[in-house]
Image (cartoon, coloured by chain):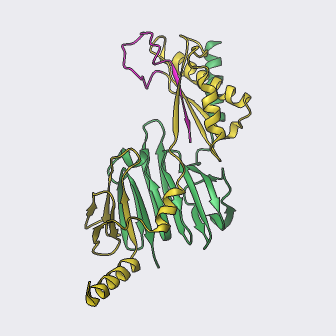
Amino acid sequence: MVRSSLFLISLAALISSPAAAEIGRIKSSVGSASIERGSNHIPAAIGQELMPGDWLVTGKDGRMSLTFVDNTRFAVGPNSRIALSKFEYDKTKQNGSFVTKVERGSLAVVSGRIAKSGRDAMQVSTPESLLGVRGTRFIVEVRP
Amino acid sequence: MNGRVVALLALFGLAACAHSSMVLLPDENGGHGQVAILKPDGTGETLVSEANSRATLSATPAIHPLGSKGLKPTEAALLASLPPPPKSFTLYFLEGTTEMTEKSAPLLDEIKAEIAGRPGAEVQVTGHTDTVGSDADNDALSQKRAEEIMSLLASKGFDRTIMSAVGRGERELQVPTDDNVSSPVNRRVEVIVR
């Protein structure tokens, strides 16, 4: 009996945990701001969930801000195209790896647990460089 | 200042603007980290290690202090639009139960206010136990503690889809103890509002 109720509890835990792929959420957006997921364009509404591989896209008057499950925070400026190319995070061990690609535009970053979990576990790539993030707050601006 | 210097400064300013760049800032708690600028193939490291430095993102990065001019208005606006840091709360429990201590119960109202004040808030609830009892029982108890808090928050009108609950049993003691030690500080639930 004890065993079966424990089993039910663990089953409930499995069911109630959020979709495994969710890596973060939109916290604010202004003007033209959307998420590109494959061929889908999803408005960057507050609370919108993010998945690995998503592109964050803003127009001339657009901005958005977001948080990730490892406590990383982003602010995206106008005229930006930024991909969340890779995001892997082990909540239990609190380590992982996070690669963001800034094709154009501007991005402010406050790094979270992934950046602390290993040397260059968090990377930001730009057309001409690769940044290894070692636990900090910074801004990247990519001009065409 | 003579004309030539002004012209040179103007030229330098233009050159700096034409490049992609990065700015390393102090952390919110005062310290600062580092950013390594590598070539796209991952070689040739240039380390940006001073806070308030601007570096060009080119084949040969040039690093300059921000100086008295500080950030560009667009950069300041970008920083201002970052979401606030996550906030963490710890609730304590009576031994072997999912009942909060008298002192912890009022914290729920603070958590509620914090969630309400954050558009698009997410809530991560993590339950823990002390080392009294078996690992399996403590896994179950910590999960129940986390779910109890999640249910209390849901009963105050917060949508369950913004919350997640997980039990960590006795794996993550706040204060390390031997096995089978009753410890009020280890019987807890951490609530992170993001």
Nearer-the-camera pick, B100 or B42? B100
Residue A125 falls in which quadrant of the image? Answer: bottom left
Q: Colour of chain B?
A: yellow
In the current view of this chain or complex, which residue is farthest to the bottom? B3
Q: Residue at x 32, y 69 (%)?
A: B39
Compared to A84, does A1 lie above or below? above
Residue A23, above or below A102? above
**Does the rendering let one see residue A17?**
no
Q: Which residues are magenta?
A: B170-194
Instruction: In the rendered view, tell whether residue B183 sits above or below residue B63.
Output: above
What residue is rendered at 38% in x and 74% in y? A128
Magenta-drawn stretch, dominant element (helix, strand or loop): loop
Depth check: B6 or A67 in front?
Answer: B6
| Apparent colour of chain A | green
Q: Is residue A86 above or below residue A40?
A: above
Q: Could one spot residue B75 in this view of the protein?
A: yes
In the figure, is residue B166 to the left or right of B21? right
Where residue B167 appears, as percent x and y from the top left, is 54, 27
